[in-house]
Amino acid sequence: MSALAAAAPETRFAAGLHALRANRAAMLSLLIVAGFAVLALLAPWIAPHDPTEGDLLRRLQPPAWMEGGEAAYPLGCDALGRDILSRLIHGTRVSMSIGVAVVLAATAIGALLGLLAGYLRGGFDVAISRVVDVLLGFPYLIFAIGLMAVMGPGLANIVLVLVIKEWVMPCRVVRAETLAAREMDYVEAARALGETTAHILFREILPNILSTLLVVATFRMAAIIIIEASLSFLGLGVQPPAASWGSMIADGRQFMLDAWWVSTLPGLAILALVLAINIASQGMRDAFDPGLRA
Amino acid sequence: MTDIASPPLLRLVGVAKRYDLRRGLRRLLQPAEGNTVHALDGVDLEIARGETLGVIGESGCGKTTLGRVALRLQEPSAGRVEFDGIDIGSLDARRLRALRKRMQIVFQDPYASLNPRRSVGQIVGRGLALHGGATTSAERHARVAALLERVGLPRAAMARFPHQFSGGQRQRVAIARALAAGPDFLVCDEPVSALDVSIQAQILALLGELKRDFGLTYLFISHDLSVVAHVSDRVAVMYLGRVVETGPSRRILSAPAHPYTRALLAAVPRLDARDAPPRQRLTGDLPSPLRPPPGCRFHTRCPEAREICRRVSPAPIQLAQGHAVACHLYSGAAP
């Protein structure tokens, strides 16, 4: 068995990790995402000021490097004299926790329904696919605005509304991959051994879909962060005085000409996080998706 | 080897498998004719315990479907499959799962039949976990190692993943997986077709040894006549979903009765042209299983086709002990 000894001792996953590490843009982006995650986790300890407490004497105070700025308030203050840096840090917490919560829940639900629809086919598949088609037909924001208006604002409701719409994304991908995987001989072999449907779905098929699922989840997380910001911008998301990037942009838009920093800085935060997530997931797709690799 | 007296291990009675290509509403709007694939049509076969039945035919003739239906991996559209006297079509899911211990399958493509995300130890260990009664993981570990060594792989293979093996080694893993359940019947669906010729002989030799050691019965599917002749006690020749001739392999090789079998044999390349039987070249392609020809399905390509062949489907005729052919040439009904 000389070929056995010669074979590279790494799994496909390890090869993917290796490829990912070689991708500098993706690694830098991952670092940025990790930085935001640390900010989100440690927000109360990192933020220099209370994000909700305003000092009206510092109303629209410019950032530290501009005339009239102050080192204690490095990014300036908003219309109520609240520290923008502290609000950005706390806003990271809102954006990331909503992004993670929605993506986790939607992926779990979507993957399960996609596996079942793709493997069982028949009536269940038809029913699920029609629901998916209908949900896809709604524009995201219209759907979310409508439901949020009915259910009322609040963190839990945002997550719930977004999950109701978002599960279709992983579901479609998993269903398509399952349709392909169920025709593989190893699934037939598992059936011939008398494996249960649960074993075939979760032990035979799911591990082969996992890397695709990971890529979809990260891509969608970027989209969810933008949608949450949009909802908060429209006043349907996180309610004042709590800080959210979207609502911060909304707060500052009437002072855009006099105090550009109030709106622009949260906008840059969204740009940085979403761009970093997208580049990182692009790198992960290149590394893990065997369809794109030689 | 063929002991006529003992009851067969596997028996197929009038088995048919049709695939309706129409989906949903089209079933109401389109006719079934021309939209149904006739993969198997009225197949009767018996496999005696300890026997190797070779099934041969061109690609698309239904051999693979036959193997799947025999294990009830696919439901037959009509007919009955009996395993050791049990009608496996009547079993509920739980009983069928228990019976799967006794019947296993080895697939053609060892690159598709092993899950790339599961280690060889996990792949081979499942049969033991499900059917082998190996309860402790230490016991399972030892038995997987023994099985791997039995099929000619080092025990260290256990911790490795399929992509670290060559095609022949993968096929050994697939054979070990099938053996782990402890079967007495094995469907070998073109088990060597995807392998290099030098590896083919090794795998065939391994299958022969295992058959002896474990007292296995094989349904051996292949399109390669020389492989089938080498391993089989009896041969069934299939054409477009029907069995056209069955008989002991030696007899099929030396005295083929059906014009299709003769054409298959004549197509085998020979080194010495003087040995060659007169060439009976097949003309035309296999007709579409969507619209199988009426009467004898072979009449469109048969050099001996007559008027009756176009109208009447020939019934199998016993030519000798265990040798049957479905052809009007032998029915005496020909004009």
Image (cartoon, grey):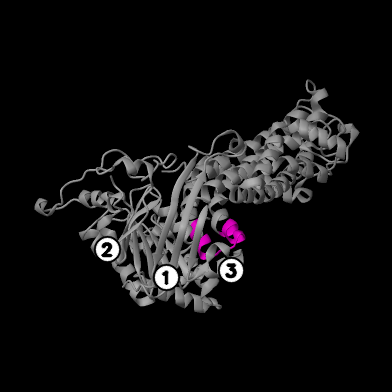
Does dot 3 land on a helix, a strand or a loop? helix
Q: Position of residue B200 (x, y in %)?
A: 28, 60
Find the magenta span and give its range: A188-203
Q: Residue furthest top?
A: A257
Q: To which chain does the residue with label 2 belong?
A: B
Does dot 1 land on a helix, a strand or a loop? loop
Q: To which chain does the residue with label 3 belong?
A: B
Which is nearer the N-term, disc 2 or disc 3?
Answer: 3
Q: Are marks 2 and 3 in contact (CB under 8 Å)?
A: no
Q: Which residue is mark 2?
A: B249
Which is nearer the N-term, disc 3 or disc 1?
Answer: 1
Left or right side of A154 for B144: left
Q: Which residue is mark 1?
A: B8
- In the drawing, what numbered circle is on residue B95? 3
Relative to B279, say whether B72 is above or below.
Answer: below
Q: Residue furthest left?
A: B274
Q: To which chain does the residue with label 1 belong?
A: B
